[in-house]
Amino acid sequence: MNGLPWYIAAELPGPMSKAYNAPMIRGFLVFCLLIGGLGCSKIPRPVDDYKADRAAKEATRLPKDPGDAQVYQELRKAGHDFTKPTTVDFYLYFPEEGAARGTLQALSSDGYAGEIKMTNGQWECHLTKTMVISAEAIDMERLKMREMTVNSGGHYDGWGAPVVK
């Protein structure tokens, strides 16, 4: 085979001669090397790497509401473990007892427990829920609580949680 490696000197079936065959094969090999150099040959990262990246980003993210972000930062400073379930307290206030009771009943099916009492001329609905605290979860809870209070003339006053290490 004229001293050329087999992949260059190999003859394809048909009318092509070795003179045309060698440059075509060389071109194909160069193409493959270029494609490999552009990242096509990368081995996909394990799922655990993606989870670690997401956890790192989540650890630095804060809730969108400034009040929620302040509580979240206080927990972070105190050394809270954001991977562990925590009993979170939510505070809602209503002008009428019926609205407070209706909210408590509606949210109890979503895993909330709570009590209602009169505080400073308003009905306080103190809810608790055990959950893993994250900025995203707190943002979602705020939306849910505001939705529950806006139609009944009440307001959502915020949340709190003990430090879990």
Image (cartoon, rainbow, N blue to C red):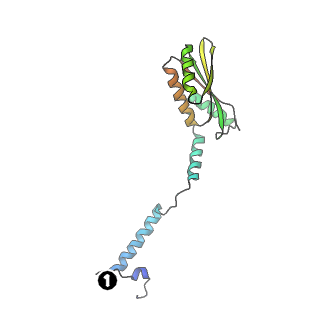
Q: Is residue 60 above or below residue 44?
A: above
Q: Label 1: few (<14), some or many (≥20) within 10 Å?
A: few
SS at badge 1: loop
* Residue 70 image-quadrant placement: top right
Residue nearest the viewer, comparing 113 with 77: 113
Query: Which residue of the protein is positioned furthest toward the right in this rendering?
Result: 165
Q: Nearer the viewer, residue 36 or 92?
A: 92
The residue nearer to you, when weighing 75 against 164, is: 164
Q: Residue furthest top?
A: 121
Q: Give me the residue at 55% from left, 36% from top.
A: 136
Q: Quadrant of the C terminus?
A: top right
Give 23 or 53, whichever is nearer the viewer.
Answer: 53
Does 156 sit above or below residue 2? above
Residue 113, image x, y percentages: 62, 26
Q: Is residue 62 above or below residue 156?
A: below
- Name the residue beneath numbered marker 1: 17
> Residue 82 location, x and y as percent?
64, 39
Residue at figure coordinates x 59%, y 32% from the top left: 69
Residue 42, image x, y percentages: 50, 61
Q: Residue at x 46, y 62 (%)?
A: 40
In the rendered structure, the answer to whether residue 129 lies left or right of residue 150 reads right
Q: Name the residue type under label 1.
A: Ser
